[in-house]
Image (cartoon, helix red, strand yellow):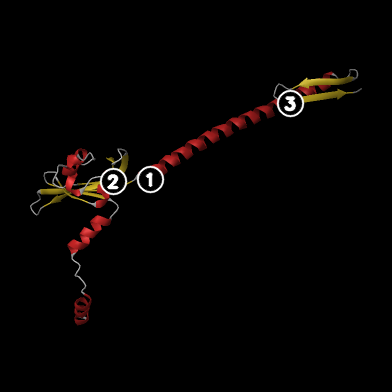
């Protein structure tokens, strides 16, 4: 098997894949935004994704202070130095257009064998679609609440009309009793106080 693989590499000139090459390829192709700083908080590595979103070239950033990035990393340093890592912290990146992009950041310290801090790693994930979905859910909830309030009001109105109808029927029955010994009544109209309700009574004796 070793001979066959060696023959294939020699014949087809396959290149040995090193771990450094793989890592470099992954860094450049991931959609998340990657920033690596040294112990002095200077930029040592940024990937293509973050360069595209902030509209910068790699040469404009590498070797510069992290303040050159349109991200407020200062608020994370103290917590990082205390806990050693941060997960799913929400913040914003200023895009090249000047608008803001909501992101969730996970970060960690890099230490040497003696425990000294040698750098910081930040990975930012775009959560704008999640934020939009939450916003839409909130709007749907507000619309549902408004619809429920309208339905409750309609139910109250309908119940009120039903109660008025019951009262009207009672009044009519009482009126019938009072007029039981009377004369012929034609076109006697009793108006209900509710909208659109009218009762017409004809009593003949």
Q: Is residue 163 visible?
A: yes
> Which residue occupies 51% across, 35% down?
145
> Which residue occupies 37% across, 42% down?
131
Q: Is residue 191 above or below residue 55?
A: above
Q: Which mark is residue 130?
A: 1
Of badges 2 and 1, the one in the foreground is: 2
Crowding at mark 1 (Cα within 10 Å: few <14, some 14-19, many 20+): few
Name the spot of residue 168 as percent of width and height, x first.
74, 24
68 on left or right of 112: right
The residue identified by callout 2 is 53
**Of the image marks 2 and 3, the number of the one nearer the N terminus:** 2
In the picture, residue 200 is in which quadrant?
top right
Name the spot of residue 99 as percent of width and height, x first.
32, 38
Q: Is residue 84 above or below residue 16?
A: above
Q: Which mark is residue 184?
A: none
Name the spot of residue 155 as percent of width and height, x first.
62, 32
Of badges 2 and 3, the one in the foreground is: 2
Dot 2 falls on a residue whose secondary structure is: helix
Dot 3 falls on a residue whose secondary structure is: loop
Answer yes or no: do the residues labelled 2 and 1 have beta carbons within 8 Å? Answer: no
Distance between the Cα atoms at labels 2 and 1?
A: 18 Å
**Of the image marks 2 and 1, the number of the one nearer the N terminus:** 2
90 on left or right of 189: left
Distance between the Cα atoms at labels 1 and 3?
A: 53 Å
Crowding at mark 2 (Cα within 10 Å: few <14, some 14-19, many 20+): some
Depth check, front residue: 127 or 169: 127
> Which residue occupies 54% across, 35% down?
148
Dot 1 falls on a residue whose secondary structure is: helix
The residue identified by callout 3 is 197
């Amino acid at each position: 098997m070793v001979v066959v693989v060696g023959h294939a590499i020699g014949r087809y000139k396959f290149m040995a894949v090193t771990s450094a090459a793989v890592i470099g390829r992954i860094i450049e192709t991931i959609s998340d935004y990657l920033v690596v700083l040294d112990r002095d908080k200077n930029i040592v590595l940024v990937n293509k994704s973050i360069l595209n979103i902030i509209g910068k070239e790699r040469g404009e950033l590498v070797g510069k202070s992290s303040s050159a990035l349109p991200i407020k990393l200062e608020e994370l340093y103290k917590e990082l130095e205390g806990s050693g890592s941060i997960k799913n912290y929400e913040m914003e990146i200023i895009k090249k257009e000047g608008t803001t992009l909501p992101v969730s950041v996970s970060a960690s310290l890099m230490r040497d064998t003696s425990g000294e801090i040698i750098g910081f790693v930040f990975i930012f994930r775009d959560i704008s679609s999640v934020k939009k979905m939450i916003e839409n859910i909130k709007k749907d909830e507000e619309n549902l609440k408004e619809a429920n309030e309208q339905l409750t009001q309609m139910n109250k109105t309908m119940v009120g009309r039903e109660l008025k109808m019951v009262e009207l029927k009672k009044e009519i029955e009482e009126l019938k009793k009072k007029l039981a010994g009377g004369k012929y009544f034609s076109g006697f109209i009793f108006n209900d106080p509710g909208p659109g309700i009218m009762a017409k009574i004809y009593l003949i004796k």
